[in-house]
Image (cartoon, coloured by chain):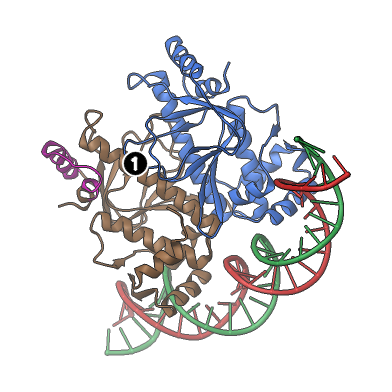
Chain colours: A blue, B brown, C red, D green
Amino acid sequence: MAPAILALQTLADLDLSECAALQSAISRRRNFAPRQEILAEGAALSQPLLMLEGWAYRTHLLADGRRQIIQFLVPGDLIANVDGVSAPASIIALTELNLCAAPAAGSEGSGLARAYAAMRALDERYLFRQITRLGRLSAYERLVDWFCEVHERLARSQSCGGNAMTLPVTQEMMADTLGLTNVHINRTLQALRRDGIIETVGKTVRLLDHGACQAIVGHRVR
Amino acid sequence: MAPAILALQTLADLDLSECAALQSAISRRRNFAPRQEILAEGAALSQPLLMLEGWAYRTHLLADGRRQIIQFLVPGDLIANVDGVSAPASIIALTELNLCAAPAAGSEGSGLARAYAAMRALDERYLFRQITRLGRLSAYERLVDWFCEVHERLARSQSCGGNAMTLPVTQEMMADTLGLTNVHINRTLQALRRDGIIETVGKTVRLLDHGACQAIVGHRVR
DNA sequence: CGTCCTTTTGAAGAGAGTCAAACCCCGTGG
DNA sequence: CCACGGGGTTTGACTCTCTTCAAAAGGACG
């Protein structure tokens, strides 16, 4: 089963015709190479897209070269559109990736409509979380919180095995995501390894002590 | 004309019946006192709301007392809901305020539907901007950028005269919005006054040199 | 095996935080 | 009318997290 369908099914039950519509859309998927721009800032998008496989990221560039990565997009994520409104940030493929047009939701209360709505609500929740992370967490806490979030999102499409996940993300990109420098990311990762919070093998990160993560981040009141 | 209607009209043309529906909703508005909670984090919201008058803010609290203000809500802003999904952050009235249920949009391409969609897109754009602000701007730049954004949003409902606007916001709240401390906000405001960027009289702020603001913030690539 | 990207390390510096106290404004009540 | 109180603002001195700059080391790949 495609990761994207798995992710949507965790949000609402999809009936057979909806799964068929998804499969049909998937059969008309588009492929992107790493570093390829999926959507330019300021461009219009004629239809919502659904991430199928691979990673992308949404980013803002400042004229002096500073970059802020707004969020990463993983399988199951939606790229919403509003007719006549231009994209507020560009989206760039991080890995080889596939996406397709998100099939129409049908009637208001349909499973697909509910799944889309839930996914959009989740998306907003993650944006709020990113704001809190940047505004009020220390570097150490930002990394832990971010790892937890990424794990949660990958788990939704079963794209990670247990507590281990493979992140196609350089330390410089983590820095641009978390509002830090690559140097400081590097040092903070060392601290996390030293403290037995994570274990890294190449690009694979294992969250060793999920309880400790919750404790660190978990002063976040639900 | 109600500020909220003015704001929506800047986003899409509304026909007479839509204005009437808005007026009717406004006649059934609800009033909130300062500091009153409009929506608790984790609570469900049965219908979307429309801000009519006054200010509110959306906020996250951490268990150790740290606070992040996600965004301010001003007249014309929508508070979206998704059935069965709980609110990701609480909303609190900052001033005496009025809001009402957002009237149903009618058919897909109606003026009201387009206005709502455009407002939601704007909202997302401001969230992205807040992320970039927190992640990549200095304290000085954050304040300038934030003042520009607030001005733009108030102007939409004609809630500010020219370049002057009255912000019912303490320096401590600015700090919790911009990821800084109240002490540092205070010192940075002094720098802005010294540099002739802003002028303050009580809670009223005047943006003196809109060009300079654009230049400071304007390395933001459109 | 050389090249390019990424990670790692060191030393020094700056921006923002912390703590504590004074000051100011403004509404309240004696 | 003025002392009182309380939130908000301002100031000073000191600290610390994170940045900057530069260079070395590691790894993947043609």
x, y percentage for residue D24? 86, 57
Judged from this view, the residue extending furthest toward the top is A16
x, y percentage for residue B1? 14, 52
Examine the rendering and report whether any part of residue B62 can be seen.
no
Q: SS for tag 1? A: loop
Does the magenta-highlighted stretch encompass residue A67?
A: no
Up-down relation of residue D9 to residue A69 (above or below): below
In terms of depth relative to the viewer, which is nearer, B189 or D19? D19
The residue stretch that appears in magenta: B7-28
Instruction: Answer with left or right where residue B26 lies relative to residue A96.
Output: left
Instruction: Answer with left or right where residue B79 lies relative to residue B180.
Output: left
Instruction: Answer with left or right where residue B17 lies relative to residue A94.
Output: left
What residue did someone put label 1 on? A85
In terms of depth relative to the viewer, which is nearer, B161 or D7? B161
What residue sits 26% from the left and 63% below the top? B160
In terms of depth relative to the viewer, which is nearer, B168 or B12? B12
